[in-house]
Image (cartoon, grey):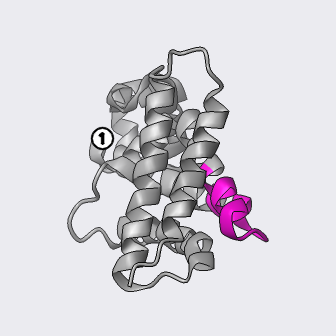
């Protein structure tokens, strides 16, 4: 019988907090149970083992990332929208590394429609941000890949302490996104 008041959302949020603080590898049933003050077997009433925990973290992270991107980009377009969305993406990676890894880096299980829909929601927001460049087809896909690669690379390097030189990192990031935007202006015909 599930502990009174304990639900799937609480279990997943506890696991997500552990993933953010200690890394995704630190997420175990025993660690989450200890965090919640319950025995490990009771978690099976809410998630399907460790895989269920990681899947829950992925869904939570993707939903939160999409919401952060949407909030940052609303009412903005062009370079302003791109800078706002990329800044929100960067902040999310820094603030929620475990959620980000589970959702945006780790591939979903084949046929997991819920995970695929959550990932697609992030893409839809980014498509909206890129709408100012009037891209379609392959050009839009290339632009989405470039955006994700640029921001993911920068944010993960930054989070790992990869920018050791005493030079403003925010300026470097702004220049990166501005260069990306300039590249989107190129005629792809």
Query: Visible in this render: residue 146?
Result: yes
> Is residue 110 or residue 151 the one in the foreground?
151
The x and y percentages for residue 64 are 59, 54
Q: Residue at the location (44% across, 30% down)?
A: 157
The x and y percentages for residue 174 are 64, 44
Q: In this view, does 167 lie to the left or right of 45?
A: right
Asked where in the image residue 27 lies, by quadrant, the reply is top left
Q: Magenta stretch: give its range.
A: 68-86
The x and y percentages for residue 172 are 59, 35
Q: What element carries label 1?
A: helix
Name the main secondary structure of what is drawn in magenta. Answer: helix
> Is residue 166 or residue 34 the one in the foreground?
166
- Label 1 belongs to which residue? 50
The x and y percentages for residue 79 are 67, 62
Quarter of the image where the C terminus is located: bottom left
Residue farthest toward the right in the current orientation of the protein = 75
**Residue count near mark 1 (Cα–Cα under 10 Å), binned few <14, some 14–19, many ≥20:** some
Residue farthest toward the left in the current orientation of the protein = 110
């Amino acid at each position: 019988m599930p502990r009174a008041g304990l639900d799937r959302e609480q279990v997943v949020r506890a696991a997500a907090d552990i993933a953010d603080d200690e890394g995704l590898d630190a997420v175990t049933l025993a660690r989450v149970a200890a965090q919640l003050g319950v025995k490990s077997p009771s978690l099976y009433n809410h998630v399907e083992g460790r895989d269920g925990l990681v899947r829950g973290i992925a869904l939570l992270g993707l939903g939160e990332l999409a919401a952060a991107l949407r909030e940052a980009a609303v009412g903005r377009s062009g370079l302003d929208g791109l800078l706002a969305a990329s800044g929100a993406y960067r902040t999310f990676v820094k603030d929620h590394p475990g959620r980000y890894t589970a959702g945006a880096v780790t591939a979903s299980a084949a046929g997991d429609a819920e995970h695929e829909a959550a990932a697609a929601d992030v893409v839809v927001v980014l498509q909206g941000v890129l709408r100012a460049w009037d891209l379609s087809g392959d050009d839009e896909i290339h632009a989405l890949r470039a955006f994700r690669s640029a921001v993911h690379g920068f944010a993960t390097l930054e989070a790992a302490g990869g920018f050791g030189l005493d030079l403003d990192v925010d300026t470097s990031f702004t220049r990166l996104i501005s260069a990306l935007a300039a590249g989107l202006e190129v005629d792809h015909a």
